């Protein structure tokens, strides 16, 4: 990148309802990790929250025209994602947080290994009829986790699609638990849906974990403070952000950016998983 174009900002657009951003801790911790790395080099994150990808792409075009950022952090890569092509057209360097597309520099999460770890924990306790409430099905990491779950030979899997909101977590949990064959365990793709699901199970008159075991994806204070405390899949989200920040700095400086992987998430067993009755 031409030094005359350099700014002190790295752009991050979140196409996400603001109400979710205020209640879900993941992105705040992730951004804090990026910011910590950038601040040491006199840079900062320019954050913009929008409702959908069309508005996100419009933000990229505006930033490029006004030369407001030196690089972009792209999150939540999706199936048939139009954003990487737009960023190449705009000549905005990009680091993907997640599964890369078109050989884009990326910091990846081991979603296959992490799903296998979650299932191994539940199968080891004796569960086989396991449901999962996912995030949006268009996201690559949702698809990867789903593929890994459906490939598990020892599991009678049921997958239903949510949207990361508390409302979808509660509604879909109630649907699963009132169906003809309720699962003995449920995995949630984020902490907010899991906490809402826990409350929904209680409202139906069931007990956790006696009647159903629950696992939340991505540990947070919401999970630790729930009653009973939620078993989780734990990732050092701050470290994930730091790794992304490191890659962005290398990219801006013109260096090579080798692909990085986060550590496989680990099960933090608390009070919501036990052997099925």
Image (cartoon, grey):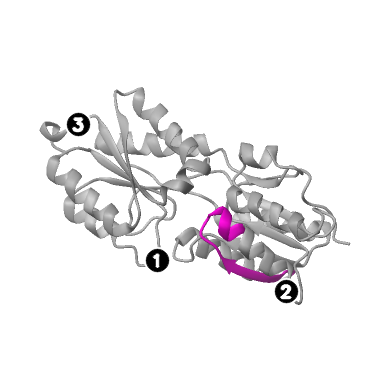
Q: Residue furthest left?
A: 4
Mark 2 in CB contact with mark 1 (< 8 angstroms): no
What residue did someone put label 1 on?
A: 79
* Residue 226 horizontal side relative to residue 256, left or right: right
| Disc 2 and disc 3 in contact, CB within 8 angstroms | no
Q: Quadrant of residue 119?
A: bottom right
Q: Residues within 10 Å of mark 1 (few under 14, many from 20)?
A: few
Q: Position of residue 4 (x, y in %)?
A: 10, 32
Q: Which residues are magenta?
A: 154-169
Q: Quadrant of residue 139?
A: bottom left
Q: CA distance from mark 3 to mark 1?
A: 31 Å
Classify mark 3: helix, strand or loop: loop
Residue 50: give x, y in percent of width and height. Answer: 33, 50
The relative height of residue 227 versus residue 155 in the rendered view (above or below) is: above
- Name the secondary structure under disc 2: loop
> Which residue is under mark 2?
179
First in sequence, mark 2 or 1: give its number: 1
Q: Is residue 159 on the magenta stretch?
A: yes
Q: Residue at x 32, y 58 (%)?
A: 53
* Side of 154 where 167 appears, left or right: left
**Foreground residue among 235 and 200:** 200
Was residue 48 drawn as part of the magenta stretch in this picture? no
Q: Which residue is mark 3?
A: 7
What distance separates the C-alpha of mark 2 from that of mark 3? 55 Å
Q: Which quadrant would the C terminus be assigned to in this image?
A: bottom right
Q: Which mark is residue 130?
A: none
Indicate which label's residue lies in the foreground, 2 or 3: 2
Q: Which residue is drawn at the image coordinates 25% and 59% (left, top)? A: 85
């Amino acid at each position: 990148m031409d030094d005359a174009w350099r700014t002190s900002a790295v752009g991050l657009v979140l196409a996400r309802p603001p109400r979710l951003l205020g209640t879900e801790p993941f992105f705040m911790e992730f951004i804090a990790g990026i910011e910590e790395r950038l601040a040491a080099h006199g840079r900062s994150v320019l954050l913009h929250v929008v409702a959908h990808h069309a508005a996100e792409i419009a933000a990229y075009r505006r930033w490029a025209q006004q030369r407001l950022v030196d690089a972009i952090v792209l999150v939540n890569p999706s199936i048939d994602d139009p954003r990487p092509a737009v960023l190449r057209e705009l000549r905005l360097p990009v680091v993907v947080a997640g599964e890369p597309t078109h050989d884009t520099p990326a910091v990846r999460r081991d979603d296959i290994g992490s799903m296998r770890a979650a299932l191994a924990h539940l199968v080891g306790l004796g569960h086989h009829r396991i449901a999962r409430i996912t995030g949006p099905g268009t996201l690559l990491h949702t698809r990867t986790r789903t593929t890994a779950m459906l490939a598990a030979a020892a599991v009678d899997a049921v997958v239903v699609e949510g949207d990361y909101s508390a409302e979808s977590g509660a509604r879909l949990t109630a649907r699963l638990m009132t169906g003809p064959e309720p699962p003995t365990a449920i995995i949630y793709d984020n902490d907010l849906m899991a906490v809402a699901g826990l409350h929904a199970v209680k409202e139906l008159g069931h007990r956790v974990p006696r009647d159903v075991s629950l696992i939340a994806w991505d540990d947070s204070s919401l999970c630790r403070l729930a009653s009973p405390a939620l078993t989780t899949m734990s990732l050092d989200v701050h470290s994930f952000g730091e790794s992304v920040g490191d890659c962005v700095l290398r990219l801006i400086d013109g260096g090579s950016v080798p692909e990085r992987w986060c550590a496989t998430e680990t099960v933090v067993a608390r009070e919501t998983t036990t052997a099925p009755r």
